[in-house]
Image (cartoon, grey):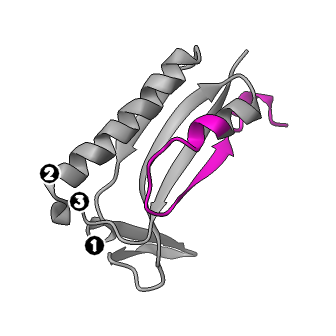
């Protein structure tokens, strides 16, 4: 049985509008190679997405007894931003890490096992 993992892609600088067509194609080829490797391993991509830059993000901070604080990005305290994600299955933690290492990035990726909520007490 396979477990689900979420991989967050973090980049120090992310501006897709500043990328050349060649840079974009090279990055997409790397992502396709990762996706193909997941399928070749007998696993599946559950969800994926690229995110807009931090200047297009909104931060929502709950406040006790009042309306939430809404702040538009970019956020000065953020040096690296999440630029995309994958949710995928893997048979073992080792396989999940091996696959994660294939994701192209100018920064790094973070890999989290998904907590299955119906088993949490």
Quarter occupied by residue 7: top right
Residue occupying the far right of the picture = 121
The residue at 43%/68% (across/down) is 60
Residue 46: x percent and y percent? 49, 27
Q: Look at the image and give the residue range highlighted in magenta.
A: 98-121
- Which of the two discs, 3 and 2, labels the residue nearer the N terminus? 3
Q: Say which of 101 and 93 sits in front.
A: 101
- The residue that mark 3 highlights is 16
Query: Quick one: SS at disc 1?
Result: helix
Mark 2 neighbour density, 10 Å: few (under 14) some (14–19) many (20 or more): few
- The residue that mark 2 highlights is 21
Mark 3 neighbour density, 10 Å: few (under 14) some (14–19) many (20 or more): some
Mark 1 neighbour density, 10 Å: few (under 14) some (14–19) many (20 or more): few
Rendered position, 49 above or below 73: above
Rendered position, 115 above or below 37: below
Query: Quick one: SS at disc 3?
Result: helix
| Residue 106 belongs to the span the image colors magenta | yes
In the image, taking residue 116 as reference, residue 42 lies left or right, namely left
Query: Quick one: SS at disc 2?
Result: helix
Residue 67: x percent and y percent? 43, 73
Gap in angstroms between the C-alphas marked 3 and 2: 10 Å
- The residue that mark 1 highlights is 55
The residue at 46%/78% (across/down) is 78
Q: Say which of 97 and 54 sits in front.
A: 97
Location of the C terminus (image quadrant): top right
Q: Are marks 1 and 3 in contact (CB under 8 Å)?
A: no
Residue 88: x percent and y percent? 55, 30
The residue at 49%/72% (across/down) is 61
Judge whether residue 45 can be spotted in this image: no
- Foreground label between 3 and 2: 2
């Amino acid at each position: 049985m396979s477990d689900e993992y979420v991989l967050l892609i973090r980049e120090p600088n992310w501006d897709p509008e500043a990328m050349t067509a060649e840079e974009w194609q090279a990055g997409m080829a790397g992502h396709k190679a990762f996706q193909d490797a997941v399928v070749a391993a007998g696993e599946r991509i559950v969800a994926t997405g690229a995110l807009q830059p931090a200047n297009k993000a909104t931060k929502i901070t709950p406040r006790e007894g009042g309306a939430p604080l809404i702040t538009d990005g970019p956020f000065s305290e953020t040096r690296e931003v999440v630029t995309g994600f994958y949710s995928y299955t893997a048979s073992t933690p080792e396989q999940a890490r091996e696959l994660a290492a294939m994701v192209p990035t100018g920064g790094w990726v973070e890999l989290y096992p998904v907590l299955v909520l119906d088993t949490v007490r």
